[in-house]
Image (cartoon, helix red, strand yellow):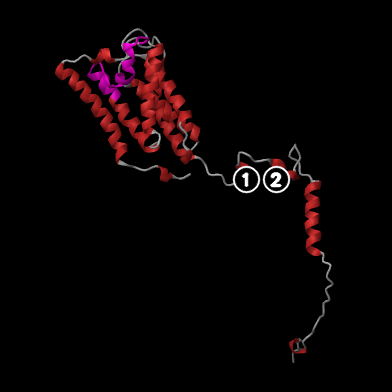
Amino acid sequence: MNDNQFKFTNAVVGVPLFFVLFLWFIYWMEIRFGFDFDRNGIYPRTFSGLQGVVFSPFIHSDLNHLYNNSMPLLVLLAALQFFYAKQSYAVIGYGILFSGILTWLIGRSNYHIGASGLIYVLVAFIFFKGILTRYYRLVALSLAVIIIYGGMLWYVFPKVDDTISWEGHLAGLISGFVLSFVYKTPEYKKPVKYDWEQPDYDSTDDKFMQRFDENGNFVNSPVVEEEEAGLMSGYFTSNVAVDYEIVVNKKNESKPES
């Protein structure tokens, strides 16, 4: 695991900027040409309301609604693209799809519009994914996200504000949570250095671990002692007779000092 996985590319700026500009373009078209896109939102449990699963994140009721969604999207999409570049497009696409379908299933009989569901997908994914990786930089990102956007959690409950789609928020939160488990990040996995870190490690085959009993007390394992005794005897014994002869060179003998 290393920090080389974090690479700044044009997509880190381009993806969130393009997405947000597209939202503003849709809103400009609605104002400029007098369209009413609200009816293209999610209308729960109706066949025509299914179109909102795809279209609703791009539709906003007024300028304030659009502005409040634009700023978090810029920040969260940039963070997603920088730290989770390999998973970013799938998280955005499936996040919109799954949160929309869940909203269609549980929502009130009204039109649900806005990109807030996607925002909750991103917050949930970044937070839970960072905790699951246990990589210190991603954990720090998770904490930063929850500090900045933690107050949004209240808006997944009913009766907090009847003018917002708490169902869409809850659907986005659930979808982001599920996606954090679905999409793995092996690039952030800690490399295995020792045998005991292997998933198929068996301590009964480890010579060192055989020196300890089930209570952690040091013991002399008979199996280990027999193997060591066999190695020692095989190393120091031989069937060949060896004769040693000591030769003294008189030239190298020490002389008394005069």
Residue beneath the point at 39% across and 42% down: 6
Where is residue 214? Give x, y as percent. 75, 37
Q: Are marks 1 and 2 in contact (CB under 8 Å)?
A: yes
Residue where numbered disc 2 is placed: 206
Q: Is residue 33 above or below residue 214?
A: above
Q: Is residue 249 above or below residue 244?
A: below
Residue 220 seen by the camera: no
Circle on res. 195? 1
Question: Is 145 in front, or is 24?
Answer: 24
Which amino acid type is shown beneath numbered disc 2? Answer: Asp
Provide the residue span drawn in magenta. Answer: 44-69
Badge 1: residue crowd in 10 Å (few <14, some 14–19, many ≥20): few
**SS assignment at label 2:** loop
Which amino acid type is shown beneath numbered disc 1? Answer: Asp
Residue extending furthest left? 32
**SS assignment at label 1:** helix
Q: CA distance from mark 1 to mark 2?
A: 9 Å
Find out whether residue 56 is within the magenta segment.
yes
Q: Is residue 53 above or below residue 137?
A: above
Residue beneath the point at 81% across and 47% down: 222
Question: Is 249 in front, or is 51?
Answer: 51
Residue 239 seen by the camera: yes
Where is residue 91? Give x, y as percent. 39, 29
Find out whether residue 166 is within the magenta segment.
no
